[in-house]
Amino acid sequence: MKLPRILRANFAFLLVMLVVVLSICLGVAYLIERLKMTAIHQALADSAMHARAFEDHLTRSLGSVEDLAGFITAGSDEQSTGDIEDFFERTLRYTPFLRSLSILGKDGRIVSSSNPANLGLQIPSADYVPPLPASDTVLRIGRPWSGRDFAEGAPTTADRPIEAGDLSFIPVQHQIEVGTRRITLLAAINPDFFINYFTQRLEPEKGCVDLLRYDLVVLLSTGDHVKPGMSYAGKELRALLPQTEIGQFEERTGRETAAFTAFRATRQYPLLVVTHLHREGALLSWRNESRRLLFLVGPALLGTLFLAAALYRRQQRFAAERVEKSQRERERLAATVLDTVSEAVMVTDPDNLIVAVNQSFTRITGYASEEAVGRVPEQLFTEKQSSELEMEVHRSLAAHDHWAGEIRNRRKNGELFVAWQSINLVRNEGGDIIHQVTGFYDITEYRAEADRITWLAHHDPLTGLPNRTLFADRLSQAIRQSRRTGEKLALIFLDLDKFKSVNDTLGHLVGDQLLQAVGERLLDCVRDSDTVVRLGGDEFVVLLPAIDTSLHAISVAEKIKQTLCLPFQLQSHTINISTSCGIAVCPDHGTEEKQLMKCADVAMYRAKASGGASIYMSQGEEFAP
């Protein structure tokens, strides 16, 4: 009778121990898997961020080629080949992403080029994307060529890609109209410029970047898994591309080539930017974290089993001690895990007093644990949040016991930082709040870079004035406001007289300084509600919304003309220029953006044709039936 009771007790103990061991193992496995999923999501987000930044840089660089086409278009029909080649040579000094610039004749031969060796070459134009008819004027991307330039190069094929280490370039064509002629601008893009740019921001040991045409022909790559000229073989990308132009996925082609991949089509051109973050490197932090977790849990698990067996043998008198030790072990493990995470964590009680912080909290804010515990968060973080944000936080916590968003706070030394913060409420079984757990990451550098990229997308980097993109948005808003209120608005197009002679005689550095000084004087001539825009070169636009009569625009134009006629003192040089102004008024000369800009542009050229240093008001005949 005694033996079966002992066996039953031992079996029950073993069963309980087995359940405990399996529960801990499953809990650790679940936690490790959650950490892995978090690492994967972060890697995909980082890959997508790189793709977005690289696509923006590529679009702005290729936009310069279209700007060059615009400069040539602005020239006269009688421009000589020598004038164009001189323009090409000057342009190449400031565009390192270009190898050469050429003009194609009607028969497809190069008739003018910055590289004399290219003259007379027959350039095939069939394998370009998009394959548009000759009447369209869009930037077309060709298949990569081997060599440094057309003279010593040859186009690639899918069977004959460019080998690693060989020179290559990417041809692009753009049909333009010069006076009454239609010609083709041919540019040789330097892939090494973009490869250097990409590798400086995404180290080769962390990942690589591919640039593809929309037909998946490889144009360049910072890795060695593909070669320029070959067709991209990624099955996942081929499956996703017909559905979306922006995406991300996990590539599992092999242990060495597995990667977290993001792709993004450019906004204006038939190109795809594909970024790959190596899986091994992206998950390295997760592996180290998992090893540390297992290193902590393993001994704790073994210790728990040993104590359980010993306490069981010594009967119930050690039960209370066993529970106490187990509790201490769990608290120690939780504290260790809390201090190993990179996220700052702050725990408060129902009275909003801080009861615990981790080491990342001290690292980010500068407050040690003993300085923070026992105080309310408002005593540490003095940066006042907006009332709208505070209301949003309260609503979200009341509805979901959770809130996450971006905030700004100050460190102990007074330095401002940006954080991505999440707040979670902890309730007891009765539903009462017992703790509030706040976690946050320092995203100051990421936010600064994002703001810088946004600013560059809407402003001229030389003068700091709004560019064409921002001008188009403000003009559209001003026209809508004019329609609602019945007030007029005016456009003043300005072209600087004698600017070319300043560039030719004193150099581009003085010319750039003159453009900056002109921008400052223009700002002094207008209201805060007006917009001064640099279109490019020496052309500026002033947008005057909400004016009573056309006389206001004429008055501003006269003020600008008088101001720009005053001498400029730059680098010990006294420079005298003037300006030709063309004015168009809405709704007198049109109610659409295109109409107003055309009227103002034509008026400006008539003012310039009259000898310069004059103002011409549009008559609206540019769009008369």
Image: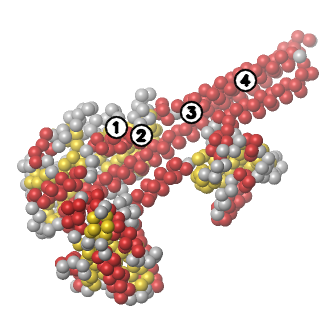
Residue 40: percent from left, percent from top: 52, 39
Which one is in front in this view, the residue at disc 4 or the one at disc 3?
Answer: 3
Q: Which mark is residue 301?
A: 4
Using the image, tell me which numbered label, if any, was put on residue 122: none
Q: x and y percent of residue 298 in the render? A: 68, 23
Which SS class for mark 3? helix
- Kindly identify the amino acid type of the residue bearing the numbered disc 1: Thr
Name the residue: 68% across, 63% down. 391
Mark sitting earlier along the chain (2/4): 2
| 117 on left or right of 593 | left
Tell me the mark number nearer the camera, choosing from 3 and 1: 1
> Viewer-proximal residue, 555 or 260?
555
Please tell me which of labels 4 and 3 falls first in the chain: 3
Q: Residues within 10 Å of mark 2 (few under 14, many from 20)?
A: some
Q: What amino acid is found at the position of numbered circle 2 in the picture? A: Leu
- Quadrant (top left, top right, bottom left, bottom right) of the C terminus: bottom left
Label 3 to label 2: alpha-carbon separation? 20 Å
Q: Which residue is mark 1?
A: 222
Q: Which quadrant: the N terminus?
A: top right
Which comes before the other along the chain, label 3 or label 2?
Answer: 2
> Pointer 2 and pointer 1: residues touching (CB < 8 Å)?
yes
Locate residue 469: give its quadrant. bottom left
